Image (spheres, grey):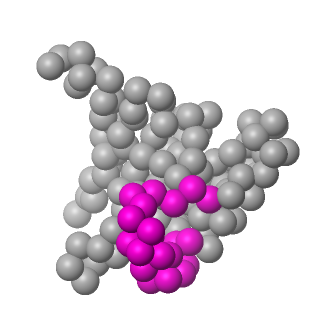
Amino acid sequence: MTRRVVVEVDMGKYKSVNLEHGEAEKLLSTIIEELGYESTDAAETFRIIRNFDTFYETMKKKFKDYLAPSKSLDDMIRGTVIVDRVKLLREGDEKRVVIVFDRRISEETLAKALKKLGYEVEIKRLVEEAKAK
């Protein structure tokens, strides 16, 4: 059975993926492996994912939709930022994570990493949908 996932590309060219909690951590590890480097924001994102319940409660208390992992100024200057922001969701008993990747992470890198994890990838460009309406 092939699992499907949609990579959404917004108007700012940020790419987002909505995955199950454990799969989100695997994806981030695979992306880091593909890129050959780990950034401060990626390490912070791992911390957010691993401590899902704590960060989910904090997010809800502060009425936030997204959490922005701290980014190093060095990473921003070098262009090695991986994660822009993270959204934690609960759908019944299931924990889900939406990772919004930095615009410099290519669609090809994301698709390759997702395919390594056994997903069939669909890329959905929100700009084209907006133009069609």
Q: Which of 66 and 62 is in front in this view?
A: 62
- Residue 112 showing in the rendered view: no
Which percent across, then down, holds residue 68? 57, 56
Q: In which quarter of the image is the C terminus?
A: top left
In x, y percent, where is residue 108? 51, 35
The quarter holding residue 18 reads bottom left
How many marks the image carries: the answer is: 0
**Quarter where residue 19 is shown:** bottom left
Residue 46 relative to residue 79: left or right: left
* Residue at the farthest right position: 74
Task: Determine the residue located farthest toward the top in the rendered image.
Answer: 131
Rendered image quadrant of residue 47: bottom right
Locate residue 113 relative to residue 35 in the image: left or right. left
- Check the image and report above or below for 80 versus 48: above
Q: Closer to the camera, 63 or 128?
A: 63
Residue under the point 29% across and 74% down: 90
Q: Can residue 3 be seen in this view?
A: yes
Which corner quadrant holds the N terminus? bottom left
- The residue at the point 24 percent across, 16 percent down is 131
Q: Identify the residue at horizontal 38%, vertical 72% (top origin).
A: 60
Q: Is residue 63 magenta?
A: yes
Q: Residue 103 in the image: x percent, y percent?
A: 56, 34
Q: Residue at x 62, y 59 (%)?
A: 69
Whether 88 is among the magenta residues is no
Vertical placement of residue 48 versus 85, above or below: below
The residue positioned farthest toward the left in the image shown: 133
Q: Position of residue 61 (x, y in %)?
A: 41, 75
What residue span does the magenta drawing correspond to? Answer: 48-69
